[in-house]
Structures are given as C-alpha cells and as structure tokens.
Image (cartoon, helix red, strand yellow):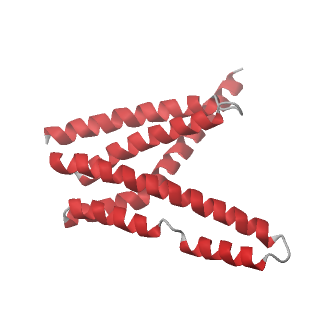
C-alpha cells in the first residue's frame, strides 16, 4: 500500500514537471536547436511512460527491472519501425508522381507492406509477456495501446489552458 502511494506521488510529480517543462522546451524551438529539443522531449516522454507503466501494471520488484529493460527495447524497435514506415511511405509518394520505375515501385511497395521490424517486435512483445502474469499482461496491453493518445489529449488540454491564459492577459490590458 505504501509502495503504491509512493509510486503515485512520484508519477504525479514527474507528470507535473513534465507538463511544466514541455511548453518551455517547445517555446525554445528554432531551426538550429530543433533536433536536440526533440530528443529532450522524447527523453522526458520515455521517463514518464516508464513511470506510468510501472504504476499501471504493478510489477514486483524483480519484475520491474526486467520489465523496464524489455520495454525500452520494445520502444526502440517501435521507433525504428515507425521511421522505416515513414521513409518507405515517403518513397511511395515520390514514386507515385513518376512514370515508369516499375521495379522500384514494386520493391518499395513490398517493403511498405512487409516492415522488416515486425518479427523483432513480436519477439520483444513476447519477452515482456513472459515476465508478466495474465492480469499484468492485460494491463500492459491496455497501457501500451492508450498511453500516447492519453498523453496527446493531456497536451491538448494544456495548450488550451495556455491559450486561455494568454487571452485573459490580452483582455486585462
């Protein structure tokens, strides 16, 4: 019980810090610092996701360290897969505008359909599921599916709040 309270407090604190830092980081974005800002945002998102994963699943101490290691590997593979999909899709868009190049189009289409990281992703998911009991597996599946959407929704709310505060300042002047 005490452990859950500490985890909840830690997650709350990290969430607040994360949500306070993001607008400042985004405000500093310019063409020369954009890659490093993106890396910083990704790092903070991964920290938050790790904490929320632990909170959502409630692993034992033995499971937690192994789970975080396997989860990081899964996230890295998902990022590589996303990057590959985007690059292949961009190639498809480019090829769609051109006549001919049939063989290039066939290869690009096959690569887009295949995504070479699928087998690695399946292994990474299986590695995580073998660590967890059935209830934890269900919680992981739900968490894995909803985290990004929930984060996106939270950031939209924060942007709306910031916009309202800016309007209030303008109205007061």
For the point 34% across and 36% down, the residue is 12
Please provide percent x and percent y for residue 8.
Answer: 27, 40
- Asked whether 34 or 152 is in front, the reply is 34
Q: Residue furthest left?
A: 1
Identify the residue at image location x=65%, y=31%: 33
Question: Above or below — where is 90 with respect to 158?
Answer: below
Quick check: 35 left or right of 123? right
Q: Quadrant of residue 165?
A: top right
Name the spot of residue 50 as percent of width and height, x first.
35, 45
Q: Position of residue 153 (x, y in %)?
A: 51, 50
The relative height of residue 171 versus residue 48 in the rendered view (above or below) is above
Report whether 95 appears left or right of 49: right
Q: Is residue 72 above or below residue 89?
A: above
Q: Residue furthest top?
A: 173
Residue 3 in which image quadrant: top left
Q: Residue at x 45, y 37 (%)?
A: 44
One can see residue 60 in this view: no
Residue 166 relative to residue 138: left or right:
right
Q: Nearer the viewer, residue 101 or 79?
A: 101
The quadrant of the rendering that contains the C terminus is top right
Q: Residue at x 65, y 60 (%)?
A: 87
Q: Quadrant of the N terminus?
A: top left
Q: Answer yes or no: is residue 171 visible.
A: yes
């Amino acid at each position: 019980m005490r452990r859950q309270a500490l985890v909840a407090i830690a997650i709350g604190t990290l969430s607040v810090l994360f949500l306070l830092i993001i607008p400042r980081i985004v405000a500093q974005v310019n063409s020369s610092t954009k890659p490093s800002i993106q890396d910083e945002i990704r790092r903070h998102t991964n920290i938050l996701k790790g904490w929320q994963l632990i909170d959502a699943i409630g692993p034992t101490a033995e499971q937690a360290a192994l789970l975080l290691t396997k989860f990081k590997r899964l996230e890295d593979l998902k990022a590589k897969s996303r990057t590959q999909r985007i690059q292949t899709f961009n190639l498809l868009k480019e090829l769609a505008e051109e006549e001919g190049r049939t063989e290039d189009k066939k290869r690009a289409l096959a690569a887009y359909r295949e995504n070479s990281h699928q087998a690695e992703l399946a292994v990474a998911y299986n590695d995580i599921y073998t660590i967890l009991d059935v209830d934890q597996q269900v919680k992981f599946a739900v968490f894995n599916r909803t985290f990004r959407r929930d984060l996106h929704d939270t950031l939209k709310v924060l942007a709306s709040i910031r916009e309202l505060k800016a309007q209030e300042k303008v109205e007061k002047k």
